[in-house]
Structure formats: C-alpha cells, structure tokens
Image: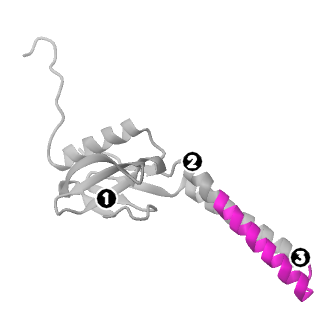
Amino acid sequence: MPTEPTVYRLAPAVVARLVGLGLVVVAVVLFVGTAVVALAGWPFLVVVVLAVVGVAAVAVTGWWLRSRAWVLRCTDDGYRVRLVRGAGVATARWNAVEDAVTTYRHDVACLQLRLRDGRTTTLPVGVLAVDRDALVRELQERLQRGHGLRPFRQPTEGTS
C-alpha cells in the first residue's frame, strides 16, 4: 500500500542565516549604489528603488525557503536531496541503499545513506526542520519497505 511522500524542509535557523546573508548583500549594494548615485549626480530615487527591490527580493526568498523549499523528499520508491552542497548522490532508490548510519563530518552530526555501489549521500541533520528520532524512524520504515520487508505485527490476545 503506497504511502504519502514525506518532505523535510530547511530548519528555521538555516533560513534565518540565509535571510541575514541576503540583507547584508542588500546593504552592500545600497552602499555602493549610494556612492554611484552621489558621484553620477542621479536622483536619490534610484537608491530608494534599489532598497525596495533588494528588501522585497530577500523577503520573497525567505518566504520561499521557509514554506516551499525542501531538502529531502522521501517516497515509496526512493529519496531525492537538494539545497545541500556536497551531499553526494542526490537521488537513489531505496533498494540501492545498503544501510543508513549516523556520522560526523567537520564536527557536524550527519545522516549517511550508503549505497550498494559504494557511493553515499550525506545530510547534515541540523539543516532539516525535523526531530532526529522522527527522521531515523521514517528512513528505517522506508528502507524496510524498499527492501521488501514488512514490519512485525503485534500478536493479538489469545494467539501465539
């Protein structure tokens, strides 16, 4: 029986960092833009337009990162990773995954999916907006189903 795909989004702290970086870029552009406007003798309205466009772009990007962008998408067939630089294999089927382990890369807790062909997908757990235990349970269930294993059923009263 097919299950709904699970989508894991960016953690709020990561979104906040990216929005903060965007605001710093806007501030630098405004600083340079103000100097150019002053030296060229252009109207100050150019700086105002730069500021409005820059802040609007950061706001829209922040909204998209928080509510639309995703990092990990798990389906019955496999998984897909995006927005994580250096994650390794971006897409794989569950039956190609040999095992899933936790590890540390550069002192950051990561989940590593090791494929049968020796390649890996490594995800820093801190970038995901999810409880670590919930992520592990989800991936265990997906891996078991992907390998054709069914979970144990609890015995009912009076059966052995």
Q: Any mark on residue 45, and which?
A: 3
Q: Residues within 10 Å of mark 2 (few under 14, many from 20)?
A: some
- Looking at marks 3 and 2 on the same chain, the residue that comes earlier in the sequence is marked by 2
Residue 50 visible to an observer of this rendering = no
Q: What residue type is disc 1 on? A: Thr
Inspect the magenta stretch and tell me whether residue 11 lies in it: no
Mark 2 residue type:
Pro
Please provide percent x and percent y for residue 62: 62, 57
- Of 42 and 61, nearer the camera is 42
Q: Quadrant of residue 18?
A: bottom right
Name the N-terminal-most of marks 1 and 2: 2
Quadrant of the rendering where the N terminus is positioned = top left
Q: Which residue is mark 2?
A: 12
Q: Secondary structure at mark 1?
A: strand
Per the picture, the main secondary structure of the magenta-coloured stretch is helix
Q: Residue 41: percent from the left, percent from the top?
A: 92, 86
| Circles 1 and 3: CB atoms closer than 8 Å | no
**Neighbour class for label 3 at 10 Å: few (<14), some, many (≥20)?**
few
Label 2's element? Answer: helix
The numbered dot on residue 121 is 1
Measuring 43% from the left and 38% from the top, which residue is drawn there? 131
- Asked whether residue 124 is in view, the answer is yes
Q: Position of residue 121 (x, y in %)?
A: 31, 58
Q: Is residue 42 magenta?
A: yes
Query: Do the residues under discs 3 and 2 have CB atoms within 8 angstroms?
Result: no
Q: Which residues are magenta?
A: 20-45
Element type at marker 3? helix
